[in-house]
Amino acid sequence: MPTFEDSDLVAETPLTQTKSRDINRAPSNNLAVGDSPTLAIPSDIQDGTVTSIEVPATRNSVADTTNYMHNLSISPSMKDRRGSRNSFGTSLPIPRGKRQSRLSSVHYPDGPGAAVRPGMPPIQPSRDIIAAQLQDLAGEKVQAAKDMAFVFDIDGVLVHGDRLIPEGQRVLEILNGDNELGIKIPHIFLTNGSGKPESARIDQLSQILKNPIHIDQFIQSHTPMRALAEYYKTVLVVGGEGYKCREVAEEYGFQDIVVPNDIIAWDPTIAPYRVFTDEERKTSRPRDFNKINIDAIMVFSDSRDYATDIQIIMDLLQSENGRFHTKAKDPVSQRIPIYFSQGDMLCPTEHPFPRMSQGAFRIGLEAMYKSLTGVELERVVYGKPELATYKYADEVISSWMETIHNDEKLPANIYMIGDNPASDIIGGNMYGWNTCLVRTGVFQGGDNDEENPASFGVFANVLDAVKTAMKKELGQDFNFEFNEKINPVHGKGSAIE
């Protein structure tokens, strides 16, 4: 299994930071490994502090369209695939530093109805007292618990759409403290899902899973793309339902956000087959795009209208520096950058078979671009299994460790649990995590996936995977329920007299 550190996968030198439109880009299919990068991220911020980290993207000398141009029914083998879908030498910025949180690892009841003792702190629940005593007496096991962490894919692992996978609820109960030590086991959620603000998504998941999920534990495919707000002012944001992706971009700090409906409201002839309703027109923000340059294209989520979105994107990619109604003399050097939040071809839904995802849209766009221009489309892909997403996951895990255990460090033993070998497993393997493949989503194969085998094994569901991993790290006799009646001193009876 290749790793992110392989010399033939990782860019050899840091990317020179210049403005993207000032770079003389050459067709990517004329480059050889070791040549200078042809797509750069501008980072000469004039004011304010740069709060992002640029992570070298792994390189792929053959575009994904190669396997699709002559026979679109052929599915390429992952055995020979390199670890990235990104262009040569590209750097992907990710947010720097931890998210701020006000949570505490110990809960003191201070809400309505809490007991009050004048001049004294609120009374701790007896469970927290017992758990603290148990943890004091089991130092070695507690340290092992703090030195492991879980990273969960969501769809196909914990839920199917809006429907709970029952084992997912029990897993979160165990990790949130319903275990023999009453200790919280670090865990985060890493999904290629997208299309709505993180806050809305975690509220929905918390209700489905019947367990609290904090925004500081949660990474969607476009979450790391908030760092791009420092690099581009006017952006086209594509995908998602209604105007939710515009809302996401606004939360990320993008200054000037355009969506396809804004453009159609300005010039309906751009999408001749699109039926544009009066309600859509009322909620759009048209202006004279003849006078505006789009700095970059951000595909945040799955397209709801392939024909319209591809047409608009193709117009911009062939324009002079992102201005509509223009045609570039050199479509390569004047091409604006395009970013995709993830590259999955398929995703599990409530339908019996996985449905096409953003990767399928990207493949179609790449094929169309090559057909019209004769050159490969340089593009940047976030999400699993790209390196930048895993680097960002490290930041989030370390921050969450500080939140629940007051110790900002990265646990030594990290377990990735997913259902998609082409993203969850290949990415986790290349990043050196222990990977667990479950049979409740995309993967329905044999003993293990032949192309990207899970390093820790294949399990019927997420609960089996978590219990197996915890027994390995904490001992085969580890109990997955907390006994509130136990006396920590002698292990029997009640601790409360």
Image: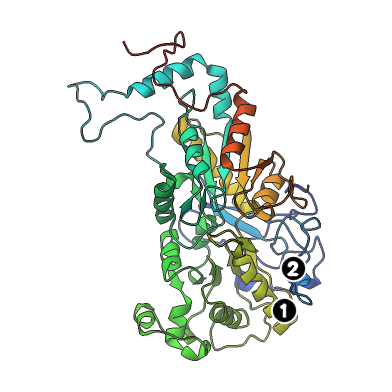
Residue 217 seen in render: yes
Q: Is residue 287 above or below residue 212?
A: below
Looking at this rendering, what residue extends furthest in the top direction? Answer: 490
Whether pointer 1 and pointer 2 mark residues with C-beta atoms closer than 8 Å, the reply is: yes
Residue topped by disc 2: 63
Tell me if 444 is positioned left or right of 467 in this view: right
Q: Quadrant of residue 118?
A: top left
Left or right? Give the position of 7 relative to 182. right
Image coordinates for residue 253, horizontal then vertical, percent: 43, 61
Q: Nearer the viewer, residue 459 or 382?
A: 459
The residue pinned by badge 1 equals 370
Question: Measured from the top left, where is residue 405 in percent x and y?
Answer: 47, 30
Whole-percent x and y of residue 139? 53, 17
Picture coordinates of residue 389, whole percent (x, y): 60, 52
> What secondary structure is marked by label 1?
helix
Element at badge 2? loop
Cα–Cα gap, marks 1 and 2: 10 Å
Where 486 sits versus 38, above or below? above
Identify the residue at horizontal 67%, vertical 52% (top origin). 444
Q: Residues within 10 Å of mark 2 (few under 14, many from 20)?
A: many
User: Looking at numbered disc 2 in the image, what kind of residue is underneath it?
Assistant: Ala
Q: Which mark is residue 18?
A: none
Q: Nearer the viewer, residue 241 or 220?
A: 241
Q: How crowded is mark 1: few (under 14 residues within 10 Å), some or many (20 or more)?
A: some
Q: Residue at x 48, y 78 (%)?
A: 260
Seen from this angle, which residue lies furthest front?
Answer: 352
Residue at image x 68%, y 77%? 333
- Earlier residue among tags 1 and 2: 2
Drawn side of residue 301 relative to residue 75, left or right:
left
Residue 390 higher or lower than 403, as above or below: below
Residue at image point 43% right, 80% down: 262
